[in-house]
Image (cartoon, grey):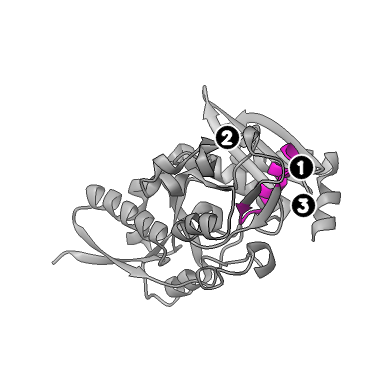
């Protein structure tokens, strides 16, 4: 009989889609195994009426999955990389990162009104301080309000709570096949994404050699390097859901380019910079860029927010 590998996933529609997607990749490359999907509720899934910035973000969407890993109830967990804290529990590692989907944010608006054309005072929903700060930096005339819940819930709230628009990640919308709902993909010049946005990470026990070998078959080295740089920057800045930090790294012509920003909650102050370097120096590039941001005033912003 084929050995069965147990896969932990959050219970949301998007999380289950992502886990099924990872399983499909693994089946192609590892036909000698079968896979069982095990849905698990996390704290972040249960507190849907509370703003992320008010909950505290360490392990908000991962802790219960990590406990299941440590207790050997699952063999690996699938996460959105943007949800994973930069410090993991002892004994666990991110052993693979899949090829990144589009990492941009998108605007979904009533009557397909573009961002620049939203009327003064338009009510825009987002669960992210990062998005809030960058939107207000460009359009301080807009009214930004918290909106939580899975994608279905947010789209419904757009109607029931009279939002003019919402801003969410492109990857989630497109993974569920809702391309037609997107009004506009927001350029990085307007909204730098969250660290790891658009990429899926596989968390495993660090000493589980058989599982590590299986998982390595779906690792995407370029995405892994880029996300490593972004997470290195985030860890150095000690950021998370409660801090408006955006970052994006890409590889072009054999070099890594990383851009990042730190902003005040009201968007009035926004510090942004970039760096280019060698791919193999991903962690160091993240730290160096974080230092550049700190030198330009990010320390004061971070201290005031904390």
Residue lying at 29% horizontally and 49% vertically, measured from the top left: 25
Reading the image, the residue beneath label 3 is 265
Residue under the image location 41 percent in, 44 percent down: 174
Q: Nearer the viewer, residue 99 or 264?
A: 264
Are the residues flagged by discs 2 and 3 in contact, CB closer than 8 Å? no
The mark that comes first in sequence, 3 or 1, is 1
Q: Secondary structure at mark 2?
A: loop
Cα distance in 3D space between marks 2 and 1: 16 Å
Residue 296 at what x, y percent from top left? 84, 39
Which of the two discs, 2 and 1, labels the residue nearer the N terminus?
2
Q: Nearer the viewer, residue 99 or 70?
A: 99
Disc 2 target residue: 114
Is 190 magenta? The answer is: no
| 36 with respect to 146 (left or right) | left
Q: Is residue 85 left or right of residue 141?
A: left
Furthest residue in direction bottom, as rendered: 71
How many neighbours does mark 1 have within 10 angstroms: few (below 14), some (14-19), or many (20 or more)?
some
Residue sitting at x 41%, y 59%: 15
Percent position (x, y) of residue 286?
A: 66, 42
Q: Which mark is residue 98?
A: none
Query: Which quadrant of the rendered structure holds the C terminus?
Result: bottom right
Q: Which residues are magenta?
A: 125-142
Vertical position of residue 14 compared to residue 91: above or below: above
Nearest to viewer (mark 2 / mark 3): 2
Is residue 265 visible in the rendered image? The answer is: yes
For residue 233, say whether it is visible. no
- Spatial distance from mark 3 to mark 1, Cα to Cα? 12 Å
The crowd level at tag 2 (other Cα within 10 Å; few <14, some 14-19, many 20+) is some
For label 1, the residue is 140
The image quadrant where one finds the N terminus is bottom left
């Amino acid at each position: 009989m084929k050995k069965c590998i147990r896969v932990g996933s959050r219970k949301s529609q998007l999380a289950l889609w992502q886990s099924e997607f990872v399983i499909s990749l693994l089946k192609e490359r590892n036909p000698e195994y079968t896979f069982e999907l095990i849905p698990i509720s996390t704290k972040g899934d249960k507190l849907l009426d509370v703003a992320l910035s008010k909950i505290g973000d360490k392990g908000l969407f991962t802790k219960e999955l990590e406990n299941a890993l440590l207790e050997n109830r699952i063999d690996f967990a699938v996460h959105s990389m943007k949800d994973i804290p930069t410090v993991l529990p002892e004994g666990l590692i991110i052993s693979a990162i899949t090829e990144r989907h589009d990492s941009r944010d998108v605007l979904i608006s009533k009557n397909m009104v573009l961002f620049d054309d939203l009327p003064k005072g338009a009510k825009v929903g987002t669960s992210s301080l990062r998005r809030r700060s960058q939107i207000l930096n460009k359009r301080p005339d807009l009214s930004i309000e918290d909106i939580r819940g899975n994608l279905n819930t947010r789209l419904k709230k757009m109607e029931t709570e009279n939002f003019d628009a919402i801003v969410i990640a492109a990857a989630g919308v497109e993974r569920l096949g809702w391309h037609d709902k997107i009004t506009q993909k927001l350029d990085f010049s307007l909204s730098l994404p969250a660290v790891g946005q658009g990429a899926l990470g596989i968390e495993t026990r660090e000493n589980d050699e058989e599982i590590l070998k299986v998982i390595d078959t779906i690792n995407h080295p370029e995405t892994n390097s880029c996300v490593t740089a972004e997470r290195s920057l985030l860890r150095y800045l000690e950021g998370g859901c409660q801090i408006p930090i955006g970052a994006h790294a890409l590889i072009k012509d054999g070099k890594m380019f990383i851009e990042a920003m730190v902003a005040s909650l009201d968007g009035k102050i926004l510090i942004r910079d970039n760096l280019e370097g060698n791919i193999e120096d991903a962690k160091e590039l993240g730290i160096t860029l974080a230092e550049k941001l700190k030198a330009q005033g990010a320390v004061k912003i971070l201290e005031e927010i904390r």
